[in-house]
Amino acid sequence: MEIGRRNTLRVVREATPGLYLDGGEPLEILLPGRYITPGTVPGNVLDVFVYLDSEDRLVATTETPHAMVGEFAYLKVVNVAPGIGAFLDWGLAKDLLLPFREQTTRVYRGQWVTVGVFLDSASKRIVATMRLSRHLSRTAPTYIEGQPVNLLITSKSPLGYNAIVENAHRGLLYHTDLVSPLTLGQKLQGFVRKVRSDGKIDLSLDAAGYKRVTPITEQILLALQANRGRLAFDDATSPQVIREKFGVSKNVFKQALGALYKKRRIRFLKPGIELADK
C-alpha cells in the first residue's frame, strides 16, 4: 500500500462508517460510505486513492486528485493559514497543504501555482512544494528524437515556455515553433526535438523529422482530391489557418509541400496549389 497513490485493496469488513480495506497486516483503511458502490461486499477488490484525513488517519477514496505523489500540477490556492501555509484545491474533500517552507514566494487566496506533490518522510503527510527542482528526476533523460511525451506548462520565458516532461524532466517549447500562446498549467502532448548535453530537452508540438512530414503530405493529397485537385493553401498561408486546417505548424506544412513538389505531385499556383496530374 502506497500513501498518495492509487492502490488495489481488498475489502475485509463492513462497519457503520463504511468499508475497511486491507492495507497490510495489521493495518485497515476506511473507505467512507459515500464512496461505496451498492453491492460491494467483503472479498471484493477496489481501486482507491489512499491519503491522510484531517485527523491524520489513513483513509481511502474512489476519487482521483489532480496530482498524486511524484506528480506536478497547476492548482488554485483556496486559503492561507497564518503560521501554517496555503491550502490548495487538488480535487479531494481535504485540501492539499503548501507549507510556508515550501513556497518560493508568498502566495495569496485565488492564485494559481505550479507545485510538485510529495510525501513528507517525517509526518507521512502528503504536501505540495513550489521548489520543483528538488523533485524532478536526477537521472539523465533517455528520450529519443520524435518521441511523444506528456507536458505540463510551468512558466514563460523570453525563449518560450518551460515545461515539465513526463513528471520527471525540464523542457522548453520555443516561441518560434508556436502559432499561438500557451497557458500556464496547460497539459498537452508534445514531442522531443533534442536532448541537450545539460539534460534539458528541446520540445515541439509536432512530431520530428520525416515522421511528422509524411502524414501531412497524405493529408494534403487527400484534401486536394476532395476539392477537385486544388487548394487555397501554400507557403504564404498564415500559420493560424494552417494549424486550424491541418493541425501542424507552418514550418511542417512547408516541409510537406516541398516534399510533394520534389516528387512532382503538386504545382504551385501562387496563390494555392493543385495536383500535378490534374
Image: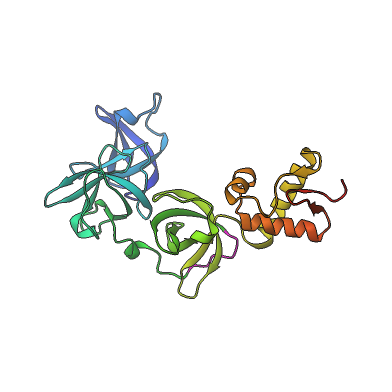
Q: Residue at x 50, y 50 (%)?
A: 180
Membership of 146 in magenta stretch: yes
Residue 58: x and y, percent? 26, 43
Q: Of 125 and 248, which appears nearest the observer? A: 248
Q: Of 241 and 112, which appears nearest the observer? A: 241
Which image quadrant for residue 31?
A: top left
Q: Is residue 108 left or right of residue 62?
A: left
Q: Residue at x 55, y 62 (%)?
A: 192
Q: Residue at x 38, y 28 (%)?
A: 41
Q: Is residue 41 left or right of residue 100?
A: right
Which image quadrant for residue 6?
A: top left
Give the position of the C terminus as an image quadrant.
top right
Residue 264: x and y, percent? 84, 57
Q: Of 70 and 270, which appears nearest the observer? A: 270
Which image quadrant for residue 63?
A: top left
From this viewpoint, which residue is outermost toward the left?
83
Q: Of 219 and 24, which appears nearest the observer? A: 219
Residue 62: x and y, percent? 37, 36
Residue 1 visible in this rendered orientation of the protein: no
Q: Is residue 155 left or right of residue 258?
A: left
Residue 72 visible in this rendered orientation of the protein: yes
Relative height, residue 145 to residue 8 (above, below): below
Identify the main secondary structure in magenta.
loop
Q: Residue at x 79, y 58 (%)?
A: 261
Relative height, residue 123 to residue 43 (above, below): below
- Region of the chain picked out in magenta, as a range: 141-147
